[in-house]
Amino acid sequence: MFGLEIFKPVSIVFSSVPITDFMERIKVHLPFKSPEYSNVYIMGEFVIDGGFISKEKAGELAGEIERLGYRIDSLTFIITHHHIDHIGILLWYDIRAIMHPSENEFLLFYTNPQHFVKPYLEWSSRYGIDLEMLRPLAEFFRSGSRVKGEANSLKKDFRIEYETPEGMEIIHTPGHSPGHICIYIPKEKILFSGDLVLSVTTTHIGYYPGYGQDPVGDQIESLRKLLSYEIDEIYPAHEDTIKNAEQRIHELIEHYENRLEEVYSGIDGICNVIDVAKNISWSAGSFEKLDGWNRVLAISETLAFLKRLVKIGRVGEKEIEGVVHFTRS
Ligand SMILES: [Zn+2]
């Protein structure tokens, strides 16, 4: 089913680059400042990830794959996780896909966003998050509805399995999302890392409904898991190929551990999540200066680190007037 020897190098075309003699990369440009693009890798009959969610971008990706000489319906797409910049082609084309079962429910973000309204409302009131701050999330749900509305061709039934193709190892690496996976090719000693390991930036980890109780602990554990593999090169879902795999993985573990200390030092007395988010630094500036979407990410990230601190017993949780507050143990 899977044999690297059958791969033929394909000529360079617009936005696609052969990066080894058995693999091509297509860069799918994204409508955000960061990340700027998603990488889609084609390797024989397998494609790693499925590009951006919009019908237009999914169509561009499908066109590019066909221009390289492949037929969409003869390929298997391995989707590292359910986020909007990885699943485009799955939503618009009748493709065969491999994805972790923990991700399946999140496809409802795109096909039935109302499903999430209640859990998100409960989440915001439990942690004292002003609904106004969550406006971008509401927009996101509305855009999910728009995708649903515009899409006669939007799929309802997905051909998703969870199996490990011959010659590969699928590694479950939760944290950034509950069913995030990496794909290891032992013969070549290469790893497709999805969003877990990026070459420059560090991946967002958030505490959201349905994401598990300790996503930061999961993320660190997932990174440690990768250290047991012999890896020559990492092909991430964004940014550039990583040649110093082990060093980069260590850097990321250190980053999350330092961030944990920073969040701990941001707890001043009895705080709710917003108080703590205001006391720590953000790459885009102070909490007050963050734009709407970055503010949502900052809140969910602070909460994820607080939950980690609770799990390891350094912080206690206390409910005051129905809102969860945190204090150093
Ligand atoms: Zn992601």
Image (cartoon, grey):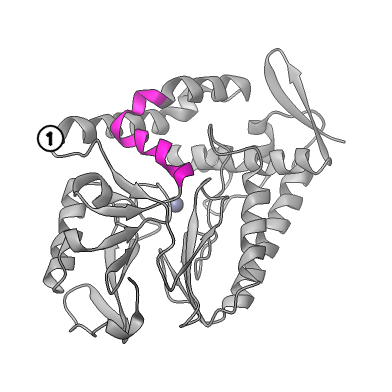
Above/below status of 167 relative to 53: below
User: Which residue is located at x 69 percent, y 53 percent?
Assistant: 259
**Residue sitting farthest toward the right:** 329
Quadrant of the image containing the N terminus: bottom left
At mark 1, the secondary structure is loop
The quadrant in which residue 240 appears is bottom left
User: Which residue is located at x 53 percent, y 83 percent?
Assistant: 232
What secondary structure is the magenta-colored segment mainly?
Answer: helix
Check disc 1 and give the amino acid type. Asn
User: Which residue is located at x 50 percent, y 48 percent?
Assistant: 179
Q: Position of residue 47 (x, y in %)?
A: 31, 65
Above/below status of 212 relative to 176: above
Report the span colored magenta: 101-115
Quadrant of the image containing the C terminus: top right
Which residue is under mark 1? 152
Q: Give the side of residue 129 with respect to residue 45, left or right.
A: right
Q: Give the side of residue 108 with respect to residue 191, left or right.
A: left
139 inside magenta stretch? no
User: Which residue is located at x 59 percent, y 43 percent?
Assistant: 301
Of 282 and 31, the residue lying toward us: 31
Q: Position of residue 111 (x, y in %)?
A: 29, 33
The quadrant in which residue 136 appears is top left
Above/below status of 66 relative to 260: below
Above/below status of 321 relative to 263: above
Q: Position of residue 43 (x, y in %)?
A: 31, 74
